[in-house]
Image (cartoon, grey):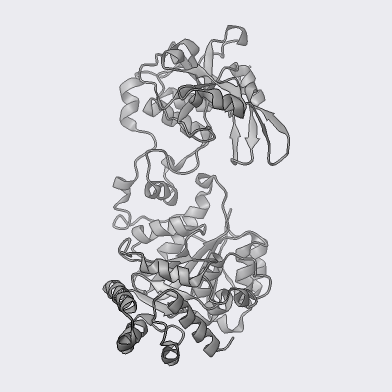
């Protein structure tokens, strides 16, 4: 499409959103160009034709002008296309779009840190976080602007890097599809405030010509997410921390390196374990990328991490341990199944923040490689011991009730229940947890689960529903029928306080002897080792 067609479509969108009066289309056309701030144009359009406006249009003019003036007090701009940077490439890869900058346009060299997906167990990727720290450590606060997009792998950690390294951050929110006029109307209904000092938002509208923009994509990148395209296209420098061979980001980097107009742009590839694979590095080096090896050790500037001591609490509250663990817990054998009078709670790894932890604290733990970042099943058990509490969860519980789950299956037989739940990305019934005498748990309100079907659920009272479990379900992955009654589940409603649980009423279990000794230093309850005969 030519510039005239783009301009006409742009005015059509703004009129449809009631950002412009209906009778001034032709007067606006000569004023539109890529990167121009539309706020003055829109304001002038209402003022120029004021005598021709109806009463309703004058009320709308007052609303629009008032909103524009409020945004401009924060240096906000509404532009056609991007301001600065790689405007031609962004338009080619994303199509013509409106861009709203609520906090203004940051000046400087735009540096994008990109990465393929890492999976769930982020605490097992210390090399990745070390590389991100090293990448941010080489940037200059006065010169560089970090670029990221909401929904990308690097976005949450780069938000924390901006804080700790004193960097400016440009965070892109891109509307992948939808009606552009509706997008503009939503802007008019929103009051934008700077979320934090040195954080700039960039809101990109849906494409003005959605079908035409899809035909402009280079090579085999037409299926890549627009958020990835935005970061790769608009950055002056790109640093790839991790790439999956044949993935979206590798294809986008190849397309960018193949563009003759982008030859002066540097693309750095982080090399090392769990970073960019050697074969990908070699191939992209041939296209013009440069390998970069993050340093093994990095010094910490206390001025940049001053908030860390107050924002990140250790996952193991030290004060709780000394008060109750007066001596090392003993190691005990697992009671035989014939004499089994316990209920068992198995722990499993926990991905994401702890229930009492903020997102910022969680990402700081990972970013700086703190021991408290550990989210393994053993770490979860250690946390339970330290806090003397089992926290209820509503995950997969019909009705959204928060409960703590146990199994009546004897511990020696629990391993038969161990299975990988693909839809949840985790193992159930791992060899870590605690066994509590059934009598003590019943005194705390524990009840066996009621297995049934939809009709059973409808017949239950409100008091009984927290203890309901669908007996049969079908696995989406394999299509097989799952009978949940083999778990012989019991539940306690809400959280379970273990403060009054004596050493004769419970024991912990772990997989190995070394883990048992680790727990023994802080546990008031004895410990059994699963791999002992």
Q: Nearer the viewer, residue 174 or 129?
A: 174
Image quadrant occupied by the C terminus: top right
Identify the residue shown where x is 70% and y is 41%. Answer: 477
Q: Residue furthest top?
A: 339
Which picture quadrant has residue 356?
Answer: top left
Residue 307 position within the rendered picture, expressed as x and y whole percent measured from the top left: 30, 51
Residue 461 position within the rendered picture, expressed as x and y whole percent measured from the top left: 48, 22
Instruction: Please give left or right for residue 241 compared with residue 372 in the image.
Output: right
Q: Nearer the viewer, residue 108 or 514?
A: 108
**Vertical order, 224 against 441 (above or below):** below
Res. 58 visible in picture: yes
Identify the residue shown where x is 46% and y is 63%. Answer: 135
Image quadrant occupied by the N terminus: bottom right
Res. 263 visible in picture: no
Give the number of marks.
0
Instruction: Please give left or right for residue 112 compared with residue 304 in the image.
Output: right
Instruction: Please give left or right for residue 255 compared with residue 389 in the image.
Output: right
Residue 455 position within the rendered picture, expressed as x and y whole percent measured from the top left: 60, 27
């Amino acid at each position: 499409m030519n510039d005239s067609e783009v301009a006409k479509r742009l005015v059509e969108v703004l009129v449809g959103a009631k950002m412009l009066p209906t009778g001034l289309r032709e007067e606006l056309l000569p004023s539109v160009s890529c990167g121009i701030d539309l706020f003055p144009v829109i304001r002038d359009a209402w003022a120029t034709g004021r005598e021709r406006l109806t009463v309703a249009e004058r009320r709308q003019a007052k609303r629009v002008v008032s909103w524009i003036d409020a945004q401009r007090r924060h240096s906000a701009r509404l532009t056609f296309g991007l301001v600065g940077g790689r405007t031609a490439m962004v338009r080619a890869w994303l199509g013509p779009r409106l861009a709203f900058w609520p906090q203004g346009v940051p000046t400087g060299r735009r540096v994008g840190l990109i990465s393929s997906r890492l999976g769930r167990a982020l605490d097992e990727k210390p090399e990745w976080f070390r590389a991100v720290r090293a990448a941010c450590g080489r940037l200059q606060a006065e010169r560089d602007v970090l670029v990221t997009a909401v929904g990308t792998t690097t976005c949450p950690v780069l938000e924390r890097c901006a804080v700790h390294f004193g960097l400016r951050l440009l965070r892109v929110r891109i509307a992948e599809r939808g009606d552009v006029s509706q997008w503009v109307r939503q802007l008019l209904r929103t009051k934008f405030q700077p979320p934090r000092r040195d954080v700039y938002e960039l809101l990109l509208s849906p494409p003005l010509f959605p079908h035409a923009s899809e035909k402009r994509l280079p090579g085999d990148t037409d299926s890549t997410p627009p958020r990835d395209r935005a970061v790769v296209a608009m950055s002056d420098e790109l640093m790839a921390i991790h790439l999956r061979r044949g993935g979206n980001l590798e294809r986008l980097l190849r397309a960018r390196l193949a563009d003759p107009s982008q030859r002066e742009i540097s693309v750095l590839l982080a090399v090392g374990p769990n970073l960019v694979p050697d074969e990908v590095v070699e191939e992209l080096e041939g296209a013009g990328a440069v390998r970069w090896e993050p340093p093994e050790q990095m010094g910490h500037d206390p001025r940049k991490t001053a908030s860390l001591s107050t924002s990140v609490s250790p996952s193991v509250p030290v004060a709780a341990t000394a008060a109750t663990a007066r001596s090392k817990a003993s190691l005990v054998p697992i009671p035989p199944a014939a004499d089994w009078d316990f209920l068992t709670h198995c722990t499993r790894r926990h991905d994401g923040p702890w229930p009492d932890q903020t997102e910022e604290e969680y990402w700081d733990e990972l970013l700086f490689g703190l021991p408290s970042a550990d989210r393994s099943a053993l770490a979860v058990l250690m946390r339970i011991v330290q806090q003397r509490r089992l926290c209820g969860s509503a995950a997969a519980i019909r009705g959204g009730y928060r409960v703590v789950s146990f199994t009546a299956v004897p511990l020696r037989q629990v391993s038969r229940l161990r299975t990988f739940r693909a839809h949840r990305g985790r193992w159930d019934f791992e060899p870590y947890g605690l066994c509590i005498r059934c009598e003590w748990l019943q005194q705390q309100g524990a009840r066996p689960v009621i297995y049934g079907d939809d009709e059973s659920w409808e017949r239950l009272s409100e008091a009984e529903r927290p203890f309901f479990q669908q007996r049969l379900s079908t696995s989406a992955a394999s299509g097989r029928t799952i009978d949940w009654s083999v778990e012989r589940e019991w539940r306690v409603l809400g959280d379970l306080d273990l403060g009054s649980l004596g050493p004769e009423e419970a024991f912990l279990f772990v997989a190995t002897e070394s883990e048992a000794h680790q727990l023994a230093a802080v546990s008031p309850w004895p410990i059994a080792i699963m791999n002992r005969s």
